[in-house]
């Protein structure tokens, strides 16, 4: 099996196909700020009403929100697979003989409760004194929860693509969106078994599988996906994850700012605050999460880092738990530049290709070089008697 370099793991790993994703100019990517999610599921219904309203699609939720640490759709989708992986082992390296990916097919009863664990907290309510949380001093509540929006990651090492014997799944050259050709599909459900995030699903009415399409018709028009535009909490930012700091102005427009996209900055800059979900699977997911700053780092380390003793990648800190603590602090107390980028969340339905943060304003331009965002950055904290108003993300 060929080997490819995985920057999230900081090492080479096995993957069935060689690819050229680093040469791709534009790649689908998303940042989700978990601190803003209120579990309203507006994103879930926007996605479902757009893409999965037909026969056989009743149980398909390509976009769902889970309550951590007890929620899951299907039930136990993450822990069941993590328990099967050995140390330093991705799902490709753990595959049985004759298989390309290690996975499993969730049973019917595991799909029947999409809201299982909703608003279930970790810990027990105190009977005596109330414990005050102070993350800056490493003190966290014994009781906590947070909401985790989940969707197809349009991975750079897609497990669904690797597992399909028909090669019915492919990664679009123009934007990295992973699609399924239903004319080639024969319903073997290998993609359903292979994807560790359980987003490809089998349709019993048509006899073929389906998977999230990344809202590609909207992307082609320069608009953000439905889950992004419908989010009332402004939790998401979508754009070109491959657009780095050395890029020129979008579409050659002199009026537009040169440089990186905001999602690239949040996920890959020195001020990194976006982390992939279960990078130890080895798929290189391209949905990144700003972790909740009120949750103990040891729990988040399992979810958002390679979860190995030896740290190999270029994330901040000397250990992965230290990486989590540093990023939590950055999210809790954003710098001026990060605060400017946070204002772009939910600011427009247009894809923001590049941006510029000034002393008191943030501006953003789309792929055609048209200015689509121009708004003030409010940094002052106004304190009234008995009240405090803050700009915390």
Image (spheres, rainbow, N blue to C red):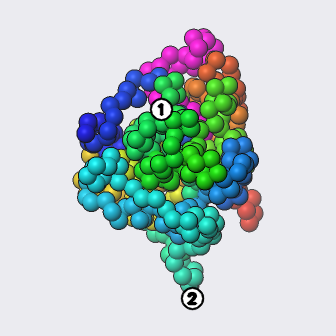
User: Which residue is rendered at x = 47% and y = 33% of the image?
Assistant: 170
Q: Which residue is mark 2?
A: 128
List the residue tagged with mark 1: 171
Using the rendered image of the protein, determine whether residue 37 is visible from the camera's viewpoint. Answer: no
Front residue of 98/251: it is 98
Disc number placed over residue 93 in the picture, else none: none
Bin the neighbour count of mark 1 within 10 Å (Cα to Cα): few under 14, some 14-19, many 20 and up: some
| Vertical side of 362 occupied by 282: above or below | below
Q: Is residue 162 above or below residue 301?
A: above
Task: Choose mark 2 or mark 1, whichever is in front.
Answer: 1
> Is the residue 165 above or below the residue 119 in the image?
above
* SS at badge 2: loop
**Residue pictured at 53% horizontal, 70% vertical:** 70
Measuring from the top left, give residue 229's x and y in whole percent. Answer: 70, 40
| Place of residue 272 in the rendered image (x, y in percent of width and height, measured from the top left) | 44, 42
Q: Residue at x 52, y 74 (%)?
A: 122
């Amino acid at each position: 099996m060929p080997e490819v370099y995985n920057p999230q793991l900081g090492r080479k790993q096995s993957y069935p196909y060689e690819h050229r994703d680093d040469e791709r100019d534009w790649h689908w990517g998303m940042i989700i700020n978990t601190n803003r999610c209120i579990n309203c599921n507006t994103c879930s219904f926007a996605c479902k009403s757009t893409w999965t309203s037909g026969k056989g699609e009743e149980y398909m939720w390509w976009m769902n929100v889970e309550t951590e640490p007890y929620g899951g759709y299907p039930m136990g989708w993450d822990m069941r697979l993590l328990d099967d992986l050995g140390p330093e082992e991705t799902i490709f390296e753990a595959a049985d003989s004759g298989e390309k990916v290690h996975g499993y097919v969730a049973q019917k009863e595991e799909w029947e409760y999409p809201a299982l664990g909703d608003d279930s907290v970790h810990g027990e309510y105190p009977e005596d004194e109330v414990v005050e949380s102070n993350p800056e001093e490493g003190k966290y509540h014994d009781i906590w929860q947070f909401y985790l929006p989940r969707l197809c990651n349009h991975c750079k090492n897609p497990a669904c693509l690797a597992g399909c014997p028909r090669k019915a799944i492919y990664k679009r050259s123009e934007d990295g969106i992973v699609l399924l050709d239903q004319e080639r599909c024969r319903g073997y459900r290998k993609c359903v078994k292979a994807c560790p995030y359980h987003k490809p699903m089998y349709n019993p009415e048509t006899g073929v599988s389906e998977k999230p399409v990344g809202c590609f018709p909207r992307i082609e028009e320069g608009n953000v996906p439905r889950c992004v535009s419908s989010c009332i909490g402004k939790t998401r930012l979508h754009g070109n994850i491959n657009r780095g700091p050395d890029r020129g102005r979008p579409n050659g427009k002199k009026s537009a700012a040169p440089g990186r996209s905001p999602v690239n900055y949040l996920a890959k800059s020195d001020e990194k605050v976006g982390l992939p979900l279960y990078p130890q699977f080895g798929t290189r997911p391209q949905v990144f999460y700003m972790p909740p700053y009120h949750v103990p780092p040891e729990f988040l380390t399992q979810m958002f880092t390679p979860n190995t003793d030896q740290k190999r990648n270029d994330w901040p800190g000397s250990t992965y738990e230290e990486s989590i603590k540093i990023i939590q602090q950055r999210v809790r107390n954003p710098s001026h530049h990060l605060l400017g980028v946070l204002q772009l969340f939910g600011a427009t339905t247009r894809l923001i290709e590049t941006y510029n943060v000034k002393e008191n304003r943030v501006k953003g331009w789309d792929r055609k070089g048209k200015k689509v965002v121009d708004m003030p950055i409010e940094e002052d904290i106004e304190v009234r008697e008995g009240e405090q108003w803050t700009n915390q993300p």
